Amino acid sequence: MKRSVGMAFVTSAIVVSAMAVVVAVPGTAAAGINSDRAQMTQIEQRIAAQGAQAQALVVRYDQAIERDDAIKAEIARDQARLAADRRSENQAMLKLRRAAIDAYTTGGWASSPTLDMFAGLANATQAMEQSEYLHVADGNLNTALASWKVDQSRTSQAQAVLVSEHAQAAATVRQLAQARGVAEAAIASDETLLGQVSGNLQSLVAAANQKRRLAAQRAAEQALAAKRAAAQQAAQSAVSPSAPLPPPVQFQPAPGGYVNPLRAIGGLMPERVDQGVDYGGFGPIYAIGDGVVLNTVNAGWPGGTFITYRLTNGPAAGLVVYAAEDIYPSVSVGQAVTAGTVLGQMYDGPDGIETGWAGRSGQGYTMAHDYGQFYGANSTAFGYNFSQLLQSLGAPGGVLQNNPPTGTLPPGWPQW
């Protein structure tokens, strides 16, 4: 019973924990959730009351069982005393008979006691003595029998009382067992109903949350579309005959053919070093040097952009560079790029950009991730190495979160 009641409260705790993370939503879903919450509260209160009643029945049932067992034990003891009294009666009868025989035979008669008693006696004096003795013997025996009968009557009366009490206790046990069964069945029924209501509530909550997610996704898509439209309009204005063209960006290739990829970013703001290097700002972002594009998108990154290209020249030839987050891609997979190729337009979004060394596949992971260096906010050896590369090309380096950075570089990794 305790287990059943406990399970009811565990179920309630789980449902309440699930309800705690749900935010209010408008419309019929909120009304349904509130209705189910109220119904669940009523069921939980009813289960609690039934559990207390069932627990009280369990206590009374256990007490009745103990009383019934005690009565059974007392009946057994009385039966044992009665049997002992009967054995004592038989032994007393046997002793009395033996005493009568011994007294008769020691009276000087030469004949056998059996012959004298059952074959008849001729001597009148002998018959008188025998009658006197038998009278005394019968009196003693009657006294013993009377005492035994009194004891037997008392024992029988006590046993009758105990048998009656036993019958009453057994009836009480049966009634309590039936009441306990009814209480357990009621609790089981309410637990089933609570589970159904809980499932309905969880379905409503899931539907409400899904509706919220879809609304947020649509809003984000609309905002992204507006930003893209604005960027396209700005790009079209930039090439319009009525607008003056911006002067070309001047740069000198560094040793190995690498060039600062952030040279045309407006409002460039260096931020933390983590898996790579974070920056804020807006404008075109270029490739560092010659390479081939491996990827442009990955839903696991903020903004969904993850542009990667494998370098084909310089000291880092064969390594993969990534530029991710708030960027509109301008390249496609398989395209060859140079230091003069615009990878995409960095827009002034909520996340900024991150650039650094990508994993060998270029599909969404970084070298810092593959080597287990990143824990969520720390600076890694791979991120710091890429920051040093950007500094060597004239870009501002990122801000270290921990010094020295986490992890080490593989043997032979290029230094800057």
Image (cartoon, rainbow, N blue to C red):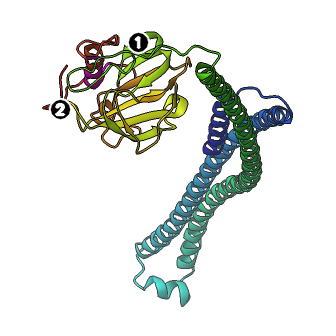
Q: Residue 410 carries which label?
A: 2
**Residue shown at 42%/72% (left/top)?**
102
- Residue 256 x, y percent position in the rendering: 21, 26
Q: Which amino acid does label 1 sit on?
A: Glu
Q: Is mark 1 on a helix, strand or loop?
A: strand
Q: What residue type is labelled 2?
A: Pro
Q: Is residue 323 left or right of residue 326?
A: left
Pick the residue in front: 149 or 184: 184
Q: How crowded is mark 2: few (under 14 residues within 10 Å), some or many (20 or more)?
A: few
- Residue 412 x, y percent position in the rendering: 13, 31
State the CA–CA distance, disc 2 to disc 1. 25 Å
Q: Within the magenta stretch, is there residue 386?
A: yes
Q: Is residue 324 visible?
A: yes
Q: Is residue 122 visible?
A: no
Quick one: quadrant of the C terminus?
Answer: top left
Q: In this view, does 112 lie to the left or right of 43?
A: left
- Residue 382 x, y percent position in the rendering: 27, 25
Report the residue that reaches farthest toward the bottom: 119
Q: Mark 1 points at which residue?
A: 271
Q: How crowded is mark 1: few (under 14 residues within 10 Å), some or many (20 or more)?
A: some
**What segment is highlighted magenta in the picture?**
378-388
**Residue shown at 75%/47% (left/top)?**
196
Pick the residue in front: 235 or 274: 235
- Residue 78 x, y percent position in the rendering: 59, 55
Q: Is residue 74 left or right of residue 318?
A: right
Q: Within the magenta stretch, is there residue 361?
A: no
Q: In which quarter of the image is residue 10?
A: top right
